[in-house]
Image (spheres, rainbow, N blue to C red):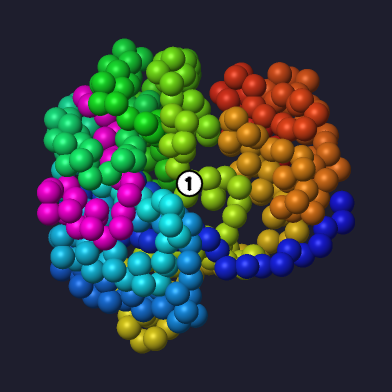
Amino acid sequence: MNATEPTWVWPRAAYVHVPFCAHKCGYCDFASLAGADHLAERYLAAIGREMEAATGGVPQEVDNIFVGGGTPTRLDADQLGRLLAMIRRWFPITPGGEWTVEANPGTLDSAKADALAEGGVNRVSLGAQSFQPDLLRALERNHAPEEVGRALELVRPRFNRWSLDLIFGVPGSTPENWVDDLETALSLGPDHLSCYGLVYEKGTALWKQWNAGDVESVDEESERSMYEFTIDRLEREGLAMYEISNFARPGHDSRHNLVYWTNDAYFGVGLGAARYVRGVRSSNTREIFAYLRRLEAGLDATGPTETLDPESRARETSILMLRRTQTGIERADFARRTSFNLDDLLGEPIRRHVSRGLLEDDGSRIRFTREGLFLADTVLCDLL
């Protein structure tokens, strides 16, 4: 299992974080802030300094960019335009590259949509989450179901690529609710859907309510039924599952997410942003005033940092690649990326899960079986 250290190159992807929100949703574990819009100008100045420092003062060309949050479209149109100009300066995108911005249906207007299109963005990810008013309230979302359609009226004429995010397993929901949500989403004609099972992230408001017994999670059988319906219904609609929670028509996979699932390097700037640059994983402080003060003082805002040894990096690569439900772990690609032989490193757990019917092995690649998808966390933890 000998491996050589890779030759590190600059990342070809960039993530930019905008933390501002109108309201902090109860399930959200991201670095997001409500009631902090007055800090937006300071934040833009700080993130501009961080981009310059992250690139060593030399613009670094990338193949894809993802601007997430928070709610990037909480910024006004002028602020959005200035943010995009900074990104273009320090992370110029290659011709044909993909530039995605997350948007909340309730905060997108024509001026902001114009600013995104004129700024170079070519893909929008809308956080619909649900089309049921009571489930939106359970998630503490602050948009109405009809606002998704209105937002798409702004998106469709300006962007050829767009996606919807949905959440199943919301407290109080039923499989019938999820069928309604999925059919409503499909009626809008998406080429990409992200369908996530609700996770009770420790420390969030929803987790505290659940831990105190104030909300009840959906039972496992119902959640499995929702996931199974998702896989089958979207396949019939021509949206193939290409990752455990993501479905797309041919050519509409999220390119930035594929960077994560192949364990490739990426820049990350902004409050709480993670990055993987030249073999080092690090993330910024999640405390807004610490972030601003450090950048304003000419310092960096880095918090936790980790450099994995070759074997740990290879194991991490395996669990990320396995999330890709079509490609899985290709032995030759894995060896090229990690310098490890997959079977020498993980042969025993792979054989065990193949015998249990959770993985399939065609000799060149390892992939989840359908049953394995429902026990993916168990398998992934075993490989790691």
Name the residue tied to disc 1: 255
Q: In which quarter of the image is residue 261?
A: top right
Percent across and percent down for residue 145 are 17, 30
- Work out which residue is located at the far front of the displayed protein and give it: 95
Percent across and percent down for residue 262 are 61, 47
Percent across and percent down for residue 259 are 54, 50
Q: Which residues, given as a range, are shown in magenta?
A: 108-132
Vertical arrangement, residue 313 with respect to residue 42, above or below: above
Residue 120 belongs to the span the image colors magenta: yes
Q: Nearer the viewer, residue 340 or 223?
A: 340
**Is residue 304 found left or right of 188 in the rendered image?**
right
Identified at 31% across, 40% down, the residue is 160
Identified at 31% across, 22% down, the residue is 186
**Is residue 370 found left or right of 68 in the rendered image?**
right
Crowd tier of the residue under label 1, counting other residues whose Cα lies within 10 Å: few below 14, some 14–19, many 20 or above: some
**Is residue 278 found left or right of 7 in the rendered image?**
left
- Work out which residue is located at the far top of the displayed protein and give it: 176
**Is residue 53 found left or right of 127 in the rendered image?**
right
The tally of labels here is: 1
- Quadrant in which the C terminus appears: top right
Identified at 43% across, 21% down, the residue is 238
Q: Nearer the viewer, residue 216 or 240?
A: 240
Q: Is residue 196 visible to us here?
A: no
Q: Nearer the viewer, residue 6 or 290?
A: 6
Amino acid type for the residue under numbered disc 1: Arg
Vertical arrangement, residue 222 with respect to residue 10, above or below: above
Identified at 68% across, 61% down, the residue is 308
Q: Quadrant of residue 192?
A: top left
Q: In which quarter of the image is residue 173?
A: top left
Q: Is residue 280 visible to us here?
A: yes
Percent across and percent down for residue 276 are 56, 62
